[in-house]
Amino acid sequence: MVILGVATEHCSSAALMINGNIIGAIQEERLTKCKNQVAFPKKAIDELIKIHLDGDVSKIDQVVFGGTISDPYATFLDRHSNFSVKQHIQENKELWHPYFYKCNNQNERDVLASSYWKEKISLNESPNKNHNFDFSFLTEKPWAETIELYSKVIRPERILALHDWTGVPKLFDHHLCHAYYAYFGVNTEHNLKKDIIFTADGWGDGRNWTVHVPDARGQGLIELSSGNTNLVARIYRFTTLILGMKPNEHEYKVMGLAPYSKSQAHINKVINIYNDILDFENGSFISRNALKDSYFDLKQRLEGHRFDNIAAGLQSWSEQVTYKWMSYWIKQSNRSNVFFSGGLSMNIKANGYILNQPEIDKLYIAASGGDESLSIGACFAQYSMTQKPKKLESIYLGSEETDHWSDRLNETSMSISEFIEIPNTTDDDIAKLLENGEIIARCCGKSEFGARALGSRSILASPVNSDVIREINDAIKNRDFWMPFTPSILDEYTSDYLIDLKGCVSEYMTIGFESTTLARQEIPAALHPADFSVRPQKVKKNLSPGYWKLINAFRERTGIAALLNTSLNLHGEPMNYSAADAARTVAKSALNILQLSEGLLIVKRDSENKVMNILRR
């Protein structure tokens, strides 16, 4: 059976399952080059059909959508991709302040929202140039009716209009898709009597949390409880905006800022503010003093508190409330192996906090549990209706390098003659360059799915000297000064660098750990500068053999079984997909070396002689 999964929400994607096995998944942003692209993922679908089905859409037996309710206004206006911080604040002032503080009933609120969005819409000038929808209906009906029409009719019909597939698409609940992805998206042994599955995010199909357990056959999931009262992710999002960063994108920056605060007394004051808004007691999320709205009221309560203390208080509170919620259901169900997905599962510091709690034996976090993985979850949900899905074996689900590196140079000021190709380079050659301080872009093998670079589309460096952080930022990344880089560590050597008492599966940078003394000596550039914590990729030879061999070659030269790893992309763009993307990135940045499957590509920038001399040694 061939199933196509489609996700049209934040960071839209498509996934392909054949006989219960996910064989491909691609985010639309990788092909449109628009970060966090929200769209009907036409390009991703076309790519999957081309790679795996010989271009024949008729081979698809079922199309499934992750999520039953979707917002066409957000898609049309490109709120998740291109809204600036200023635009988000302006929206709160113009729409949500009168919505919560001036409207007297729900009818007035609906009328206000409908008129607001329609005023923002010029049907001939959508800010989103890649949405792949006919939005002519947006100004015809009231707000609620428009959302219903778009979600249930127009959105699923795009598979017929754009791909000529003639079946009947199915829509699966947002959180059910998260739950299926959480459980089948990790390649580990299931224990049907001990496993429990949690999902949590800002909002999806009217809910923001669920708890499931596997059924007696391990084929489907049974819901224990769910609700719309877990506001942790939503509060985190709006605090991100209050701190002057983009909601739905820069929450990780707030998390990275948190360890810099050193005043526990001030942190505790912020924690108390958040605890007053939301806590978990006796099996329920409670509010002692509920927010009237998520922006203005919260901003007023945080007034006078310093930015780092706000970040630290928010992070600590979110960890504690999330743990209390999980702990209750762990005790109620007498289960201790936790699977977790949804947007909140992207908080690696919270995941590390949860892992260390005594009630939890194992914690499994699937790669990139945000809405981008709904397409995969929908495939699992559909297949489980008749048979047991196969667990996701690898997150390397994109294509190999699909085009020649020179194909994108027309987008830069460089020509082929400005590059040197060195074919048939070895892993030891690359390791030698890294040992000597070179920064290398790597585009080899199938591209990764999700938010993390995992060695296929990465920028690599030696983790020994922290000065490399400034060099990478100056060359390409332009990251905020407080943000850390991360290591890829050979799985066999993780105990040298991580304090991981429970032997956690963390192959995709989904859990934060404390570091060992040896880590602080050998890989300081890949640790958080403030608290020396680490978000590792445990590299297994069977999952990523080429990358494992490269890191091992570096280990054989230096004795260090890790590399600094960050995503291969220009600042503000999504991770690279093809070899041509990688060549363009190198050409438009100050990087000089690109590793491809067929060899090295070196930019002629007065640095080629240095590189060649290193290789000749």
Image (cartoon, rainbow, N blue to C red):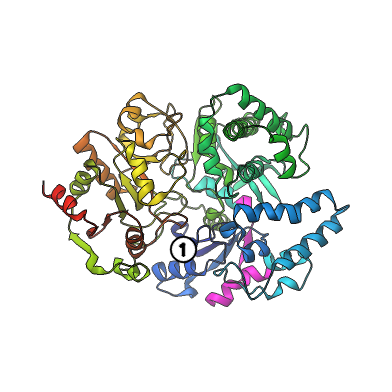
Q: Nearer the viewer, residue 298 or 17?
A: 298
Q: Magenta stretch: residue 164 in it? A: yes
* Residue receiving disc 1: 33
Highlighted magenta segment, given as a residue range = 153-176
Q: Position of residue 104 (x, y in %)?
A: 88, 52
Q: Residues within 10 Å of mark 1 (few under 14, many from 20)?
A: some
Q: Quick check: can you spot residue 191?
A: no
| Image quadrant assignment for residue 83 | bottom right
Q: Position of residue 141 (x, y in %)?
A: 78, 70
Kind of residue at disc 1: Lys
Name the residue located 71 percent from the left edge and 74 percent from the top edge: 137
| Image quadrant assignment for residue 575 | bottom left
Q: Magenta stretch: residue 21 in it? A: no
Answer above or below: position of 536 versus 7. Answer: above
Q: Which residue lies most toward the top here?
A: 265
Q: Position of residue 108 (x, y in %)?
A: 86, 58
Figure quadrant of the C terminus: top left
Q: Nearer the viewer, residue 174 or 389?
A: 174
Answer above or below: position of 181 versus 61. Answer: above
Q: Nearer the viewer, residue 29 or 491?
A: 29
**Left or right: where does residue 319 sit relative to residue 552?**
right
**Left or right: where does residue 501 sit relative to residue 339?**
left
Q: Position of residue 371 (x, y in %)?
A: 57, 53
